[in-house]
Amino acid sequence: MKKIISVALAVILMMSFAGCDKNLKIEKDENNQNETSFDVGGFALGIDEEENVVEIGMYTGDDEKVRVPDTVDGLPVVGILANCFAGCNVEEVKMGKYVYYIESYAFQWAAIEEFEVPEGATYLGDHVFLECENLKKVTLPDSLETIGDNIFEGCVNEVEVVVEKDSFAHEYCEKILADGANIKIKAK
């Protein structure tokens, strides 16, 4: 699993300034026979056949509304890798029900307006929504165990953050609000 993440991150870091390049293809890593990567349905995917999971490496389409699939070839889509939607003109992204982690900078500079982290997700990386100028509302589930640094840094609008009262996400939001984050907490 770590090998596929390392390979995917290396490719993504090399392409991070490409934004939503429709022609991006992640090539198969010939050194790891348990891994297959390909571009399908607007997503550069990494399939770890040993772990039997799929990770989204980068959105390569040009739709404004995107649905991350629950499964690909019967395998659950479990993660959104770093910079996946960076710089994309995506306004709405619906996550698949098995996504349990979203890595750092996943939506930086994206046109996203509202986002709901799926119930069951446990990890959000650093700067997930860095400089998302259109972001207005984010819903964080009570399943989150880790939230990285400055997830709303550079957001122009005040972001309404919907959280479960007394959850880890609620405590995180109270802390960053006290530190000057441009958010409004709505506890449910």
Image: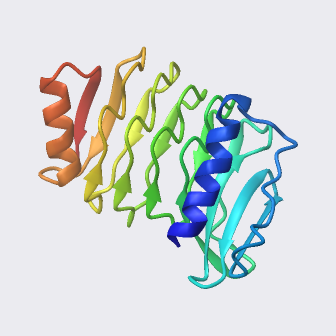
Which corner quadrant of the image does residue 30 belong to?
bottom right
Residue extending farthest front: 31
Instruction: Choose top left, top right, bottom left or bottom right for residue 128.
Output: top left
Q: 152 above or below 56?
A: above
Q: Nearer the viewer, residue 158 or 128?
A: 128
Residue 95 appears in view? yes
Residue 127 or residue 185, whichever sits in front: 127
At 41% across and 16% down in the image, what residue appears? Answer: 157
Residue at 40 percent across and 18 percent down: it is 154
What residue lies at 50% left-to-right and 64% top-to-bottom?
99
Q: In the image shown, does 187 or 57 lie closer to the viewer?
A: 57
Residue 67 seen in the current view: no
Q: Is residue 69 above or below residue 115?
A: below
Q: Is residue 106 left or right of residue 55?
A: left
Of 69 and 122, the residue lying toward us: 122
Q: Position of residue 83 (x, y in %)?
A: 58, 41
Rendered view: 159 above or below 13: above
Residue at image x 64%, y 28%? 87
Question: Residue 97: image x %, image y %?
Answer: 52, 67
- Give the x, y percent position of residue 178: 12, 25
- Picture coordinates of residue 123 (x, y %)? 36, 57
184 w.r.t. 145: above or below: above
